[in-house]
Image: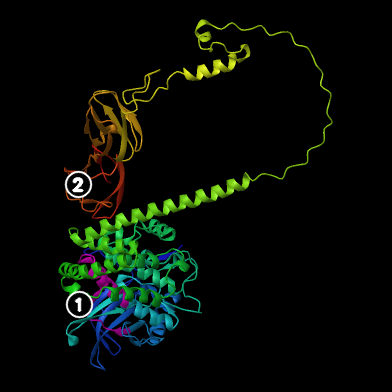
Amino acid sequence: MAHRESVDVPPGARVPRPRARVEEGLDRPPSLGPYKLVSILGRGGMATVYRARDERLGREVAVKILLPHLRREAIALRRFLQEARAVAKLRHEGIVAIHDVSPEEAVEPYLVVELVAGGSLREALRRAVPMAPEVAGELAASVLEALDHAHGAGIIHRDIKPENVLIERRSQEGGAVRVKLADFGIAKVMGQATVTNTGELVGSPAYMAPEQLEGAASDARSDVFSVGVMLYECLTGRRPFEGEGAAQVIRRIIAGRFVPAEQVIPSVGARWSSIVSTSLAPAPADRYPSARAMLSAVRAELVRTPLPAELDLGAWLVNPSETNAAVALCLEPALLVAARAACGAGDPLGMASELNRLLALEPTHAEARALLVRSSRRMRLRRHTLVGLAALAFAVAAAIALRVVRRPLAPEPIARVEPVPALFVPQPPTPRAELSPAVAALVPSGAPEGSAPRALATAVRGVRTPRAYPMPGGPVAGQVPPPAGRMLIVGALSPPFGVLLRIDSGPAAPVAEGVTVPLAPGAHVLQFECRNDACIPHSVPVGAAESVPHVAVTLRVRSARLRILSAPDRRFQLLEQPAVELHLGEDAEVPMRGSRATVHLVDLATGKQTVTHLTAGLVTTVSPE
C-alpha cells in the first residue's frame, strides 16, 4: 500500500526537502501574477504556503503553491484543484475561504486562500498543558459546526487533525478567538469517485477512521472519528492510538484499543470521556451518526456546567495553567449541585460520576467525600435487598415446583385377589431365654410370663444412657446434664458469625445467637472472641447465684492495616472508604465490619484500580503497578 501523509514535525526537527528545485527560501521571483510573495508560512505534503499581498485589492492573503515534483502527476494536480472546487461551495465563518485559483495553463498551480492571523492547534498543544474539558469542548464545538456545514453541502473533509485547525485572534473584536478549519485537499464529494489511486493511503493515519485505513467508503462518521482523536489529544495531551510505528498505530485503530480519557486524567470526568469514546468506536454504526449529533452532545455538556465568558479558549492560549485552575474552581459548585440532584433522583451512578470528577479536581472536598460514603452504603443496602428478593422469589418458585411434583397421582384400580385357605404348620417350641440377674430385677414381681419382654422394653427406656451435651470445654462421653437451673442463654452477637466462647481457662468453642450452654455450679468468667483473633476479646463474669444467665455481646472488630509500596509522589484512595488516603511509607488504618474485606485501591493520578483483600488485625502490603 502506497502511503502518503502530512507528518507532524516536532519542534527543532529537521524537515526533509524534496530533490526538485527548491523555491521555499524565496530564491524565486517574489511575484506570482497579481500576488507578491512575502514570506513562508509553512509546508506540507503537497504544497508550500506563503504569506502574500494582493496588489489589486490591497489585502494580505495566503498562497498555496503545488510542490514542483508533484506538478507532473495528474492525480496530485487534480487533488490540488479539487480543494478549490470543494471549498468554493462553502461559505462559513469556521472554514478558511478561497479567494482565487490559478489558470489551468499555469506553470505553477496555486490557490489563494484567506490569511488567518494566528497559529494552528498543533502549535498550541506543543507548548501548553492539556486543556480543561470545557475549553476543549468549546474548540471541538467550533470544528463540528464547520463540519456540519460541509457535510450539509455533501463534502467530507477526511483529514481532520490539529495541523488543519487554525486559531485566529481578532484584534478588532477585543482579542476574540475564532477557530477555522483548513486544508480540504483530500476532501471527498459524496456521490463522486475519489481521486486517489487504488491502495493509496492519503492523510494522517493517527487521525483516520478504521474504514479509511481499510480502503472502505468513508462518510460523515469518518470525520466524527477524527474529531474524537483530536478531542482526546486536547484533553489528555496524547493521542488515543499510539505505537512505535505507523503499522502498529493502524492495527490499534482498527482494533479500537485505547485507554479511556478519564483513566488517563481523572479530572476529565466520565461524561466527557463517554463523548470521546462514542466518537472513537471502531464500527461507524456505534459512533455519533453525524457531526451535528456529536455537536449536540458537546453543547449539552457545556450548558450543564456553564463557565464565565472570560474562561475560554483565548484565555487558555494566553495562560493555560491558570485557566485550567480557574475552570476547576468554577466547576466545583456546579458538580456538587449535579451530584445532589442525581442523589435526589435516585441515580447513584450519575452521582458517583459527578463526585469522582469533583474529587479528582479537589481531593480534600469534605462534602463530596461524605456524599460518596453515603452513596456506597445505599448501593450496598440496595444490592443486598435485591439479592434477598431474588432468593425469596427462587424459594417460592422452588416450593411451587416441589408441590406440583409431589402431587399424588390418581389411584389405580386394585385387582381382586381370591383368598387362599391358610395352612397350619406346627412350629417347635421356642426355648425361653434366660434373663441376667440385673435385667431380671427390672421385671415387676408377679408379672405374667409372657409380659416380660414388654416390661423389659419399658425398663430399658428408663435407664437409657444420658445424652452427652456439647460443652465449650469439650464434650464428655456419658456426662449427665447439669441441673436445669444452670443453663447459659446466648443472646444477640455482633458480629453474628465466627464468635468463640471460652469458659474460665478452658478451650474455645463456637457459639451462635439463641443457643443454650450448660454451666457447672459456681461462678465463671465467660470470654468471647473471634476466629483468627479478628476481634478484641470481651469477658463477662457470671455469678454463682444466677440461675439462668443471659448474655448479649458486641465485639469490636480489629482494624486492618494497609501498606503501600510505590513512588513517593503517588497518592492512593480506597473506593469503598474515600476518607482513607494512602502514601508511601505510611500504614493506613482501615475500619472493618468483618474479619475479611475486599477493597479497590485507586491511583488518584491515573484512576487505575487495584483489587486488594484485607484481613482484620493484619497488615496487607500492596505494590500497585
Residue at label 2? Answer: 567
Q: Is residue 439 left or right of residue 518?
A: right
Q: Secondary structure at mark 2?
A: loop
- In this picture, is 586 found above or below 443? below
Q: Position of residue 262 (x, y in %)?
A: 30, 61
Can residue 466 be seen in this snapshot? yes
Q: Which of disc 2 and disc 1 is earlier in sequence? A: 1
- In this picture, is 555 found above or below 328? above
Mark 1 against mark 2, which lies toward the viewer? Answer: 1
Residue 452 found in image quarter: top right
Q: Residues within 10 Å of mark 1 (few under 14, many from 20)?
A: few
Residue 585 found in image quarter: top left
Q: What's the distance in space between the residues labelled 1 and 2, CA to CA?
A: 38 Å
Residue 7 found in image quarter: bottom left
In the rendered image, residue 173 lying in the magenta stretch gets the answer no
Q: Secondary structure at mark 1?
A: loop
Identify the amino acid type marked 1. Pro
Q: Which of the two residues, 261 or 556, is positioned nearer the viewer here? A: 556
Specify start and end residues of the magenta stretch as a single range.
112-141
Residue at label 1? Answer: 308
Q: Position of residue 551 (x, y in %)?
A: 27, 36
Q: Is residue 121 left or right of residue 512?
A: left
Q: Residues within 10 Å of mark 2 (few under 14, many from 20)?
A: few
